[in-house]
Structures are given as structure tokens and as C-alpha cells.
Image (spheres, grey):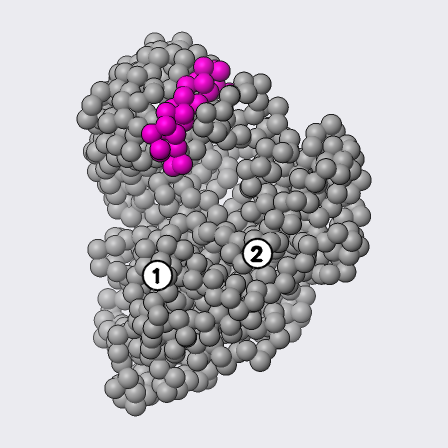
Amino acid sequence: MAAYAALLSVTSLIDQIQNHPCSPPITLDENDILVASLSTSITCLREFLESYYSISRIEESSGELTERLERRIADVAYAAADLIESHIHDQASGIEIDDHFDENLHQVIDHMSSIAMETKEKQLQYQHLIINDSFERPAPSTGLKSTSMVGFDDVFNEVLDKLMADQSNRRIIPIVGMGGIGKTTLASNAYENQSVVQHFDVRSWVVVSQDYDVRDILSKVLVDLNKGERGEMLRKVSEEEVGEKVHKSLFGRRYLIVLDDMWSIQVWNKISRYFVENNNRSRIIITTRLSNVASELSHNKVVMDFLDDQKSWNLLCNVVFGGSETCPSELEESGRKIAMDCKGLPLSIIVMGGILVKSTQTRKDWEFIADKLNLSIALEREEHCLQILRTSFDHLPVHLKPCFLYLGIFAEDKEIKTSNLVKLLVAEGFVKPIFGKSMELAAEEYIMDLVDRNLVLATVIGSTGKPKVCIVHDLVRDLCIREAERQRFLCVARKSNLSVPQGIDGHRRVAIHRSTLKDEHLLLVLDALRPASRVHSVMCDIIGVFPRPPSRTLRILNLTNRNSLDSRQSEWFFEDVLRSVNLRFLAFNPHLSREFSFSSSIYLLWNLQTLIINKDFLTPFEIWKMPQLKHVKVTRLCLPDPPSNGHVLANLQTLSCVINFKCDEAVVKRIPNIRRLKIAYGDVLKGGWSKNYYLSNLGRLQKLESFSCWFSLSTNSPSRSDCFQKISFPESLVKLEAYSSPFSWEEITTNIGALPHLQVLKLKFGVRGREWNLVDGKFRSLRFLLIHGVRLKHWTAESQQFPRLERISLAQLYELKEIPLGIGDAPKLRSIDMEYCHDSVVISAQEILDEQDELGNAGGLKVRVLAPLARRFVELRPNTAVDLDL
């Protein structure tokens, strides 16, 4: 909701100014009384919105907050932020200062105070309704959501039969049904089915969507078929050439291709000639919402209809109780009513299940949800689904609503990196401070809450068990955009809103996506982002387009496209960036032919928190004057030595990737709270091995959780071992990645194995020695172990030496004889993956699986080996002969 987000945002701005480690371009000390009055009014309005929306979600009699009042709250909060940020900009830019700043700020405060008094009167009218908010009860994180086919078993079996049928000719299997019916889930379950995986030589999954690009579709297929193919290189190849590569890659191979979310038969007509007819039972699954498209593709389509009442109830119970519990009898009546009102639409049922999981699961709560849901059942089916999704939005706690609406700023079918989303939410000012927690941790909890409510799907879980990548369903995104644009919270640029008054200018956040705009509309977008506008955030992914947004109030500039900057563009682009002194988040991907650096004026970006650059970056000395920096991610970062009187970068959490990082005492003192550090060393890089890098000081970084280090493969530098023999790590370390490391197996066991909190260890290339003998008392917290490309020959270990180990990944271990048999008894081991390992390693893994089967434990352990010719993993079965020709 726009009003609450605006209040949080201006609060964040005031906090940044008052708590800045050094003097920003503006101070509010001379206006203490005004600022105190402003903060009081903001707090009053924020508490009003928090209490109002808590009540309105559980008591129908609380009434509706008028849109006019909420609009007034948003406008006055934006006015306060604009006034302060414009004043900051003018002071930093040397522009003549407005003598009426205090007067204008006083008027804004008076306006805000009058609204606050009005809301106090409203609070008194329903103060007696304030009760415990049952929807705030925390629920445990569930990670990846189940893609259960509850209610669709017969349809799922139908698809499997069509995939495995004996007909030798290439066959198309269209799956048709409305949005949210479960087409993608059905296709995904079939695609990942083990018998299907083993049946086909190669597989590929491509999302088509309404605004498709033929070359992008073919490129994705080619990358899936040939894992070594680099997607970025295909951008330089014509559509016809990519298609021919696909044709050659499919020739003679039994393939399965999934084309998800197809809206037009034209796209199939353009790409079908590249999918060769091998007469070997190849199959193509196409999901679509359009029956006519399915009919034109094949008469043998699979139709997904709505679930009946019983199947709807079964699915709802599966979502809420996980299949391990039954629904309490006192909840069944209202629960069945909720399931019935979802009209058999799985997406609706799953989202409603997310609401019920978050409730206290009492009869009163479920009856209230059932009654409120009943208001929407007269709508058309897809609109009905959106209305149900709207119900889930209404039931969100107020602090989650801005975060949910913000998801609309990402492109359709966009895979969203959770780490970037966290940074954006913090930079936008949407995260409410929580005592004892960093803003980033609070934002992670916000995202996990949305995942738990089935509004966001976590598609990739990282090695530490947290969501790494998430996506938003098309219908959920549609709801985000509808509600966000209605509240003037954000705008997705389209032809329809570019030429109308207040089309873009009236919104605080603008998304510019190639999927919603044609080339001829770009000038309208660039014209709409004129200097006088009040846009706070711009996201653009259109190749070759660098919008010049207003500099006075800009906080977020997120250019996710991979562009080429010529010398003229780079000159004005960097000038514009440095004029945007209120920037908090800056991300761009320049393809300049040289290294580049901002001028020394970069320190004027007094509030910059995140800097992401996909290019080698020569950091100016003045970066040590930017104490608000939290995250710096650059392809290769040349970091200058800090000045003797530099500021402490107390907020810095991420630094990646620093070339020949010098960890001397001066640096350690200036980054005391670093959590993620990625560094690289080598004589092939600048600086060679001549410097002393003081890596023994790493152990003094007591907040460090994730450390990644790349070392040169060269062994010709005599000082190499001297530089790294005294390396140490802090006990706080959770994740360690070492590439071409100088460590021996004994050092890994003795030093790294002693780290009490280490959960993830990745060793790639260069470990010294051929034998690894584990000892007791080491690696007590390790959950994931990856060993890749090392010359390991003998490995001994017992089960008690890995008490928490869950996953093992082994690759390119050509000399290793076997996996220690005792590892199979590790109490929490769930998977072993092998790629390009010696045959004896695969045989030893099979023996581990067989032994676990004899002990009755094999069901919990999965062992997979890469089949090089088929370029896919094959799961081994207990007591089955190993096919070493995989």
C-alpha cells in the first residue's frame, strides 16, 4: 500500500540523515523541533495504518479506510521526502538554496499533523475492536513449495502415457486450461518424473509468454541441450544460425521439449522446422491457455478442467496440513466452504491455503475467511481468481503489502535473485527497523513470509538452505501491477500510459521492459522521465536504452540490461549518476572496451548503499569516504589502500570481487562488519605475488559468514606459499569457497574443519596432496560438501565425522578410487551427485546405496551420476547393476 510505504520511506530518509556517520550534504540539527514534530506525525499515521489494517482483516464491522484519506497520507509523505531530498540535491550540486525550505517544511508538517489528528478520531471509533492479530502468527519456513498433483492424478497419468507411448513419430502434447489451473505444474511434474528423465536423451524447458523472441527461445533450447554453450555468445548469432545449431543438436537424439505458456500458433510455425523428426519417440509438450492454439497443434490435447469439490478439499488439506495431518473436525465445515468457493481453481486453493496456514486455525478465523471469500464468487473465472488473490493481499500484514506490490516491477517470468530483492527492499525504505536485526535480515524474513503464503515461489534453494531464486506467477504479478498502479505506487511503462497526463510522471517507480514496449514507444518513455518528474526508482531491461531519469529525487537506478556504452553515452551517463546525489541503489552492466572509474566526486553519493557493476572497476580513492555503502559487487574490483584518516565503513556487508585484496590492519579496521567477501589472487592478475596480503588478519573479521577466494593455478611464483601459509578464518564463517587453493588436505582438516559454524565447503582445483584422512571432532556443522577437479586419490572418513552432512557433490575426480563406505551412515545424508568421476567412484556410491537399502534406509538417500552422452543425471537404484557406459 502506497501510504504506508511512503511513511516508511520518509522515516528511512530522516534516519539516514540523523544517523549518518559523517556530515551529509544536509543536516537537520538546526531544525530539531520541526523534525521532532515531523517524526511524531509520521509515527502517528503509521501506527494508525498498522492498527486499522490489522482490524480490517479480522473484523468486517471496522469499516473501510477511504482511498481519499490514504491518498492524502501518501501525498503528504511524498511531499516531505521530495522537499528534503531536493534540498539535499541543491546543496550538493551548488545550486542556489531555497530560502523558504523551513517555511515549506513547516507547511508539510502542519498538513501531516492535521491528517494525524483526523486519524486519531477514527481510531477512537473502533478502538474497542483492537484484538490480537491472528494473522501475525509466524509459521515455519517450508522452502521449496510442493508441486503435488493432488486432484490431477488421472491427468498426470494421461500425460505420462502420451510421453512414453510406442508411436515412433515426433508428437506434440498440448496441455490446455485457464491461468492458474495447474498446466505448468502438471508439465513440470511430468518433466521431472524419473521414468521420463531416463526415457529421453535430452530435455529442454522454455517459457514462451505473450511477447516472445524466436532467437531467445531457440537459444534457451540450445543452452539446455549443450551445457557448455554460452547464452551470451548466441546474441551475436542470427536467428537462422541458432536454429540450425538446435537442429544439429537434436539430430539422432530422443528429445523432450517443453514450451510453456504459448499464446500464438505463429511462434510454433516459426520454430517447428528446427525440431527434427528422428522417428525415435521424441515429444514436445506445449502449455497454453487458448483452446484454439491447442487444437491447431494437435487433436490429441490434454484438457485441464476444474477440480470437483472433493478434490478441491483434498488439495486444500494437503496445502494446509501437508498430508501428514487431518483437518480438525471443528474446521472442516468452513474449510470445505472455502475450498468450494475457490471454484476448483488450484491456484486459488493454494493461495487460500497460504492464508489458512498463517491463521490461528480456529473456527472463528476460518469462518471469517470463508464469509469474506464468498463476496467474490460472482466474478468470472479468471477475474474470480484475481479476486481471490486480492483476498490474500487484503489479509497480508501491513508491513508486507509494499513488498508484495513491489514484485510487479519485475518483468513477466523473471527469475528474481533473492539477494538483489533484499537490497532493493532495503533501499526503497520498505523495511521497518526491528531491534536486534539488520534491515537485510528483516527483508529476508519478509520474503520468506510471502513464500510461506504461496504468493512467491522459491525455485532455487541455496547451499545454506535459504531461497536463492524466486518467481511470481503471472496472475499474482497481474494483481501486483493492478493494485500498484491504482495506488500510484509503481507503473509498468506501456503505450497506453505514456502519452496521457500523469501517465508515468505521477508514479514513484517506473519499470521499462522490452516485453511491454515496442521500439517506437521508447522515445515516449525517455520523454516522460523528464527532470521535473518525481520518480524515485527506475528499472530498465531494454538493450541499448539508458534512460536519463530526474536526478533530484532518484533513489534506485536498476539497469538490468547488458548494454554497450559508447564514449558519448558513458560521459553523460556518469555525469547524470553523480548528479543523483540521493541514490541508494545503482546497478548497471556497461560493455566498455576498457576498465572504467567514476571520478573522485563519487563520494557525493552520500546515501549510496548498493553498487553493482558488471565490469572491471578502478575504484577511486574516495570510496573510503562513503560510510553508507553496504554492498559492492563488481566483476573485478581494484580497491585502493585506505587513507590514514579515512572513515570506517561500518555498514559494509558485501565486497566482491577484489583483486589481490590486501587485508592489512588499516583495511580490517575499516570493514569490521563485513559478512560476504570474495577475493582473487594470482600473478596473472595485477600486482603479482610481490605484496604481503596479510591474510592472517582475515580471522579478525568476526562478522564474516561467506568467504570465496580464487588463487592462481601458476606454481612458478616462489613467494606463493609464503603469502598464504598463515591464512586464518574467523569462527563466524558459514560458507567457504576456495578455487585453486594453496591448502593441503591436512590443513583443510585441521584449520577449516575446526570452524564451528561452517555449513558449506566448496573445493575446486589445486588442493595439495592425494590423501584426505578425516579425524574426529571436525566439520561438526557441515551440511554441503563439494569437491571439484582436485587430484584426490584416497579418502577415508567415518559417519560420525559428518554428523550434519546432507549433500555431497563430486566432479572431475579422475584419480579418486572410492567414496568412503562409512559416509553412507551419516545420519542426515540425503544426496550424492557425481560428474565425470572414475568408474570405481560410481561403483562405491552404488555399494553405499545397496548397504543403506539392506539397513532399510535407502529411501532417504538419492545417488545420481551424470550421463555424459545424454547430458543428464541418472539416479541409481538399490541392488541394480551399474551401467558404466552412461
Q: Residue shown at 45%/28% (left/top)?
A: 878
Question: In the displayed structure, does residue 861 sit left or right of residue 550?
Answer: left
Q: Residue shown at 80%/40% (left/top)?
A: 273
State which tag comes first along the sequence, 2 or 1.
2
Q: How far apart, in angstroms, are the residues tagged by discs 2 and 1?
A: 40 Å
Instruction: Name the residue nearer the viewer: 738 or 3.
Output: 738
Question: Badge 2, how many Cα within 10 Å: few under 14, some, many 20+?
Answer: some
Q: Residue shown at 74%/32% (left/top)?
A: 280
Q: The N terminus appears in which quarter of the rendering? A: bottom left
Q: What residue would you read off at disc 2?
A: 152
Question: Badge 1, how many Cα within 10 Å: few under 14, some, many 20+?
Answer: many
Q: Is residue 839 above or below residue 497?
A: above
Q: Amino acid at mark 1?
A: Val
Q: Residue shown at 63%/69% (left/top)?
A: 497
Residue 379 locus on image (x, y percent): 59, 78
Q: Which mark is residue 111?
A: none
Q: What residue would you read off at disc 1?
A: 431
Q: Secondary structure at mark 1?
A: loop
Q: Is residue 713 above or below residue 378?
A: above
Queried whether the magenta region covers residue 850, the answer comes back as yes
Question: In the displayed structure, does residue 542 sit left or right of residue 92?
Answer: right
Asked whether the viewer can see residue 576, the reply is: no
Give the quarter of the image for residue 429: bottom left
Instruction: Name the residue nearer the viewer: 336 or 351.
Output: 336
Which tag is nearer the camera, tag 2 or tag 1?
2
What segment is highlighted magenta in the picture?
Answer: 836-860
Question: In the displayed structure, does residue 662 sit left or right of residue 177?
Answer: left
Instruction: Name the residue nearer the viewer: 172 or 835.
Output: 172
Q: Amino acid at mark 2?
A: Phe
